[in-house]
Image: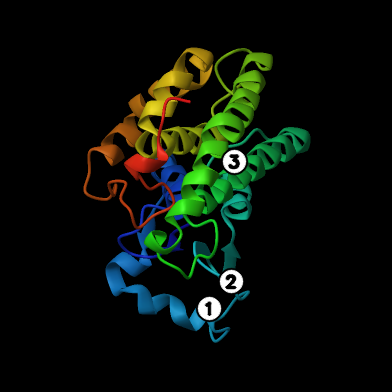
C-alpha cells in the first residue's frame, strides 16, 4: 500500500515518529505538505475530505482511511510494516509504551510553552525556566528510567524483545532530548546504558542510516517539539 503522510512543513515534531516507521520499513509514501504545501491539509482538518476528520496533524491516509494521532497511526501501521509482534497482547504492550512516549512528548512541549501554545516562548520565559527545572530534575529521570527498566526486563535490547516501532520512537525521543537538554542528557547517560545502546543500534539500521543522511530528515530546530534554549538546560 502507498501512504500519504500529512504534517507541517519545516517542523521537526510529532510527524517524525511516523516518518521513521515508514522509512525503516521501506514503505512507499508521500509527505504531502512538503510536496503540495501546508494548505493540502485544510480539507481534512475542516471535515471536507473523505475519511475521518483529524483534529490536527500528523495524520495518515491509507486508501480511504484517515488515521490521526501518532500512537494510533503506528498501531495501524505496525502489523502491515512488520514493526510490531503479531500477538494481540504484545501489540497492546507496544501501544501502551507508545502512549507513554506521547505523554513525555507532551510534557516536553509544555516545558517551553507552559502557559499557552498561542504565546511566544519569549512571553513565558520565567515560567518555562521553572518548568524546565522540574522536567530535568524529576520527569526525565522518571520517564527514561521506566523505559530503561522495560528494556532490561525484556532481555536488554528491545522493549518488546524484538525490533518494533517502539524502538524507533525511543530513538527519536532520545535524539530530541539530546538536542533540547544536552547537558542534562549527558549527566543522565550513565543511568541509561540500555537506552543509549538501543539509540545507537537504530541509527545504524540501513534504511534509518540512509534517511538520517538524506535531505528528508529535518534538523532539530526551535519550530518543533524539541527546542534548545540554553537557559532551560543544566546538568541537574
Mark 3 vs mark 2: which is more N-terminal? 2
Residue, x 29% and y 41% (percent of image)?
Answer: 211
Circle 3 — which element? helix
Pointer 3 or 1: first along the chain: 1
Do labels 3 and 2 touch, CB within 8 Å? no
Q: CA distance from mark 3 to mark 1?
A: 25 Å
How crowded pointer 3 is (Cα within 10 Å; few <14, some 14-19, many 20+) is rated as many
Determine the residue positioned at 59% across, 68% down.
65
| Residue denoted by label 1 | 45
**Disc 3: which residue:** 101
- Please give left or right for residue 136 compared with residue 231 in the image: right
Left or right, 146 with reference to 25? right
Residue 52 seen anywhere in this rendered image of the structure: yes
Picture coordinates of residue 160 (x, y %)? 64, 26
* Vertical comparison of 3 with 39: above or below: above
Residue 174 pos. (x, y %): 45, 32
Position of residue 25 relative to residue 154, above or below, is below
Q: Residues within 10 Å of mark 2 (few under 14, many from 20)?
A: some
Q: Identify the secondary structure beneath mark 2.
A: loop
Q: Residue furthest front?
A: 126
Disc 3/disc 2 C-alpha distance (Å) = 20 Å
Nearest the camera: 3 or 94? 94
Pointer 1 or 2: first along the chain: 1
Q: Are marks 1 and 2 in contact (CB under 8 Å)?
A: yes
* Number of the label disc, if any, that sits on residue 54: 2
Label placed on residue 117: none
Mark 1 Cα within 10 Å, few/some/many (few <14, many 20+)? some
Amino acid at each position: 500500500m502507498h501512504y500519504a503522510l500529512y504534517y507541517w512543513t519545516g517542523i521537526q515534531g510529532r510527524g517524525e515518529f511516523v516518518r521513521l516507521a515508514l522509512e525503516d520499513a521501506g514503505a512507499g509514501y508521500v509527505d504531502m505538505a512538503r510536496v503540495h504545501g501546508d494548505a493540502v491539509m485544510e480539507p481534512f482538518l475542516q471535515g471536507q475530505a473523505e475519511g475521518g476528520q483529524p483534529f490536527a496533524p500528523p495524520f495518515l491516509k491509507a486508501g480511504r482511511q484517515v488515521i490521526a494521532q501518532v500512537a494510533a497511526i503506528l498501531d495501524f501501521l505496525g502489523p502491515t510494516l512488520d514493526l510490531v509482534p503479531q500477538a494481540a497482547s504484545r501489540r497492546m504492550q507496544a501501544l501502551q509504551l507508545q502512549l507513554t512516549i506521547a505523554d513525555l512528548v507532551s510534557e516536553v512541549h509544555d516545558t517551553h510553552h507552559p502557559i499557552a501554545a498561542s504565546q511566544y516562548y519569549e512571553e513565558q520565559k520565567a515560567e518555562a525556566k521553572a518548568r524546565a527545572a522540574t522536567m530535568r530534575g524529576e520527569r526525565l529521570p522518571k520517564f527514561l528510567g521506566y523505559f530503561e527498566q522495560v528494556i532490561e526486563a525484556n532481555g536488554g535490547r528491545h522493549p518488546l524483545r524484538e525490533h518494533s516501532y517502539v524502538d524507533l520512537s525511543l530513538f527519536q525521543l532520545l535524539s530530541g532530548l539530546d538536542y533540547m537538554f544536552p547537558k542534562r542528557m549527558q549527566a543522565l547517560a550513565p543511568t541509561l546504558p540500555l537506552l543509549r545502546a538501543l539509540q545507537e543500534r537504530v541509527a545504524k539500521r540501513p534504511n534509518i542510516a540512509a534517511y538520517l543522511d538524506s535531505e528528508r530528515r529535518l534538523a532539530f530546530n526551535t519550530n518543533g517539539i524539541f527546542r534548545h534554549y540554553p537557559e532551560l538546560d543544566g546538568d541537574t
